[in-house]
Image (cartoon, grey):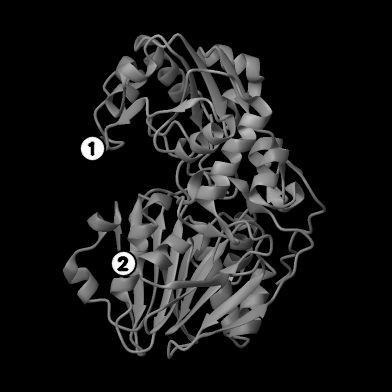
Amino acid sequence: MSSGRATDPQRTGPTEKCGVVGVSLEEREAALPTYYALYALQHRGQESAGIVSHDGFQQHEHVGMGLVGEAFTETDIDTLHGSSGVGHVRYPTAGSVDKSNAQPFTVSFEAGSLALSHNGNLVNTTALRSKLAEKGHAFSSDGDTEVIAHDLARNLLESDLVRAVKATMERLHGSYALTVMHDDTVMGIRDPEGNRPLIIGRIDGGNVIASESAAIDTLGGEVVRDVKPGELVVLAEDGSGFDAYQLLSPDRTANCFFEYVYFARPDSVIDGELVYETRRELGRKLWEEAGVETDVVMPVPDSGRAYASGYQEAAEDVEFAEGLMKNRYVGRTFIMPTQEARERAVRLKLNPIRSTVEDRSVTLIDDSIVRGTTSRQLVDLLRDAGAESVHVRIGAPPITAPCYMGIDMADRDELIAAENDAEGVESAIGADSLAYLSPEAVASAIGTEQSDLCMGCVTGDYPYDIEGETTDRDVTTPVLDR
């Protein structure tokens, strides 16, 4: 598997995964609703965006690099005819950063046309690609989505839609939430472990499938339910409803806990849980496990805000205040010609509110520490503003291992907690104290068993068979015998 990890020096925390959308309407064009839904999922991927529509006779597609607003013009949307469509925003965790890997990925074959949008990462891409190449399949990209498309196309030549999808799912090993369009039929597919979220919604004149409920809200729709792990959902072409098929049924799920901690929008609902309230509960549990008496509690904007709110609520008698002001007009591409400039880049993005911190003890709350660079800079920033002491509290366990399922989490040698215990990290970032939240508290806040979460980046044990890594369960790897 190609890691495709980016080297942008400002990406000091986990970077985006991907966002997928599928829309099927009765009469009106699907392109514009798909475009709006992608805007709602922009936080999940900022490298490329694309939409493929189908008018009942042929596909129409447009993909471009950059943000959704950069990748599309009004003219582009006007050329995407048809009442069915799939869309994608991408951050590359497998495959290179170029237009050949932008999605949706399309393929035309004897049984029709396919367009696929994929969130997640397969861990058996190389083996599956080799088997398909032996059968004469030629590949134009180095991503895993094309491998899924070729396998599904091959199975569609031999079987009906449901059987073909099941045959492909039985050959995939890893994480995937897919929106797929076969001719003008739109479907959603979620891997058997449910690692990535996928939501069904009802909108005016039809139905939508998306990575997060926020996309459905943006379209003025109503959430119907989550796609179940191992389920295929097929949207009716007339927009009337959908059919569901439980194709694979795992003994345990492996929901990515980082969706709740970091990635999903706070206003999204995943597997029945409002992300914002889950983060507030994580903050409350953080106080229960590691509360420290200080003059003021403040979040790292914007990622720590919900945690700090819950933490302060549990603490009761401590002030909640915004102590860091974010410059929202600084992107991730401003010029940093020297190492010193890169190390001080945080000051371009965040400025302390001196009256909040001067001569006061401060609790600074964030969702995670990955490399530690930003945390160290923030502690220095608060001390320079006159803070008497700075105590750091993190609403997640320490990140000690990489992610192979679609998050650019960094390699072990870049993870500050991989080689340092809490005291070591505390010293490295210059805090007066540091505490993380326990894995048990995370599972409790989400409302599930820890055994049904993927916490590989915390424990080093994964729900999939990954070369050189250990598993957290009995794993059966697909046998690719055909």
Task: Identify the secondary structure beneath mark 1.
Answer: loop
Could you give the CA–CA distance between mark 1 and mark 2, rounded to whole angstroms?
23 Å
Give the quadrant of the C terminus: bottom right
Q: Is residue 9 above or below residue 61?
A: above
Looking at marks 1 and 2 on the same chain, the residue that comes earlier in the sequence is marked by 2
Residue 381 screen position, x and y as percent: 37, 16
Left or right: 405, with 40 as reference point: right
Nearest the eye: 322 or 392 = 322
Q: In the rendered image of this protein, does residue 13 appear above or below residue 110? A: above
Residue extending furthest toward the right: 474
Q: Residue at x 50, y 87 (%)?
A: 111
Does residue 103 show up? no
What residue appears at the point 59 percent right and 43 percent down from the top-left corner? 281
- Give above or below for 337 relative to 136: above
On residue 34, which mark appears? none
Residue at the spot of label 2: 35
Between 466 and 56, the residue placed more toward the observer is 56
Name the residue at 53% across, 44% down: 3
Which is nearer the eye, 410 or 95?
410
Which residue occupies the extreme left position in the image? Answer: 75
On the question of residue 154 being in view, the answer is yes
Residue found at the very far front of the displayed protein:
317
Which of labels 1 and 2 is toward the front? 1
Q: Position of residue 42 (x, y in %)?
A: 36, 54
- Quarter of image, res 20: bottom left
Query: x%, y% of residue 458?
Result: 66, 36
In the picture, measured across the screen, residue 109 lies left or right of residue 252, that is left
Q: Residue 329 got which mark?
A: 1
Residue 103 spot, x, y in % from top left: 40, 62
Amino acid of disc 2: Tyr
Task: Compare residues 390 and 411 and report the one nearer the observer.
Answer: 390
